[in-house]
Amino acid sequence: MNDVQLVIAPQSEATQAAINSITALQRRGETVQAKAKAQQLAQQFPQCIAALFLNYQLMLAEQAYGDAGSYLAQALALQPEHPVLWLSNAQLVLANYAYAAAVDYADKAVTLYQGNNMSFLFAAAKIMMQAEQPARAMPIFQRMLVIEPANLQVMHQLALCHFFLNKVSQASELLNSVIAKSPANAGAIHLRSALQTYTQQHNHIAALQQLVDSGAASHPAVYFALAKELEDIHEYDQSFTVLKKAAALMRKTLNYNEAAELASINGIIAATTDLAIAAPTEQGSGPIFIVGMPRTGTTLVERILTQHDDVCSVGEFSLFPQLLSTMANEYLAQHKDSVANLHEAALRLDYAELGRRYMTAVTAASDGSARTIDKLPVNFLYCGFIKKALPTAKIIHLRRNAMDSCYAIFKTLFINAYAFSYDLDELANYYAVYRKMMTHWHSVMPGHILDVQYEDLVTDATETAKHVTQWCGMTFKPELLDFHKADVASTTASAAQVRKPIYTSSVDKWRNVETQLAALKVKLQQAGVEV
């Protein structure tokens, strides 16, 4: 476990020397020899925790999770109260998407650990955050603040927990403390801007403008924060000027190959023109996938559906595209002589096995809930593959006015996602191919995807929600629309919005900067997109 500097001590000088030798082999890249010697060591000293843990680490490095788990289980059987072993167990099961177990194991590790090692505690809290359990991470960060009261990183992370849990005043207090000590702290500044809608009387615009003008803060996040607060007070022209600067700065940090991205999407379309989608051989409630572009209401629909007691969301679950890619690459490697490319390989792999692997992981991630929701917007690329692997799956596609959609995307600072979103030309090109892709899927498998219009959802929530729940084979209840009252964390870019009752103020919001978006509008129209 590289990020936790706690030692599992060998039982003798001999085992220590052997471990040092194996570690040296690993550092030199001689992994085969390192694995062989480590296995010999574990066989020679089966009671040695350090030898077992070393084998666990070597197996984990090669993503041999089953073997890694076996070594770790042996070590835990010998020393069941060792916090490092429990934290390692948490990290291992998290890698296999067993979120509930990961959180429980990390919690046990923290309970057993009575020391002050910040790396250990941060690793445990990170597991809670990755499992989308900020409420479980919060007491760990609070414990860390007792150890290091002035640690700005911990204060920021604790503020993030409060934000995800809709504890705005607590988050604000912590962020203000961070910014007071570190005035150009871009992460804290950006998070603070998202806490609420600011007013003429209450905002941070003057201070942010001074930071930008003086050059003291050049991070894109500061510009995004300033643009957001300017928009809040209806200074739309100023906001957009700052926003363009923010996006340009962010774009410079990214290695985005637009040509390759668009070619890949068009390649999927070309390869799946004759995709055969069989009717489900069994009826029943399959997993629910919510897809579309970001900022189109995907989180809103997710929140409505998860008000049902037997429905659990696994959030923006990246597993399906990962499994599809892994299995397609495996097939291509095994059939190099008969398969031309990855797209062709994706059509020939074992879809029943893909579905089994996905359901095993999603069941673990949801702790066995009856219905699951996978809300990864970019799964729109894989709708046909989803239906082949999971015939009973329900796919809900969120649509939104093209201009509102693009404007909302352009305004958002995403974390490690949507590289196309920081240049208006690239955004228009991607949006056009997204629409092309969804038209394609409707043509290939008519009746298998439910389109939900964002504007319908916010103007007639009851009827739209009834239609969605019926599509999913669920019963509509009026209390489903009380999602904003639910005491459940939200960790998406829409975390602040889903804490409010459904509102219509975002409809036609792009018209506030219609002049600035004129070129985007023309480009979309030229691509055949209705605006």
Image (tube, rainbow, N blue to C red):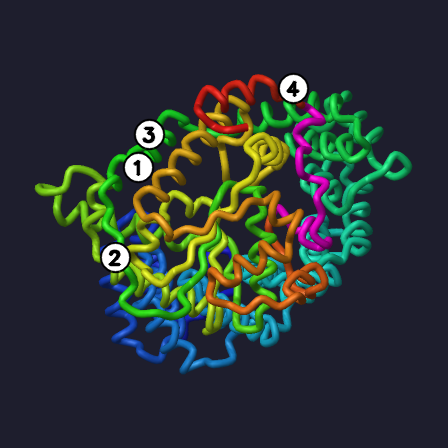
Q: Nearer the viewer, mark 2 or mark 4?
A: 2
Provide the secondary structure element on which disc 1 rests.
helix
Q: CA distance from mark 1 to mark 4?
A: 32 Å
Q: Is residue 289 magenta?
A: no
Q: Which of the image's four quarters has the C terminus?
A: top right
- Indicate the amino acid at tag 1: Ile
Crowding at dot 3, Cα within 10 Å, few <14 / some 14-19 / many 20+, comes out as: few
- Determine the image quadrant of residue 337: top left
Q: Earlier in the sequence, mark 1 or mark 4?
A: 1
Residue at mark 2: 278
**Left or right for 295, reference 499:** left
Magenta part mainly helix, strand or loop?
Answer: loop
Counting the numbered discs, the total is 4
Q: Quadrant of residue 178?
A: top right
Mark 1 touches mark 4? (CB < 8 Å): no
Q: Residues within 10 Å of mark 1 (few under 14, many from 20)?
A: many
The Cα atoms of the two marked residues, 1 and 2, are separated by 19 Å
Q: Earlier in the sequence, mark 1 or mark 2?
A: 1
Mark pair 4, 3: CA separation: 29 Å
Tell which tag, 1 or 2, sits nearer the viewer: 2
Mark 2 vs mark 3, foreground winner is 2
Q: Position of residue 391 (x, y in %)?
A: 32, 60
* Dot 2 and dot 4 residues touching (CB under 8 Å): no
Instruction: From the image, tell me which residue sits under label 3.
Output: 263
Residue range of the region highlighted in magenta in the rendering = 493-513
Choose the circle earlier in sequence order: 4 or 3.
3
Which one is closest to the eye, mark 3 or mark 1? 1
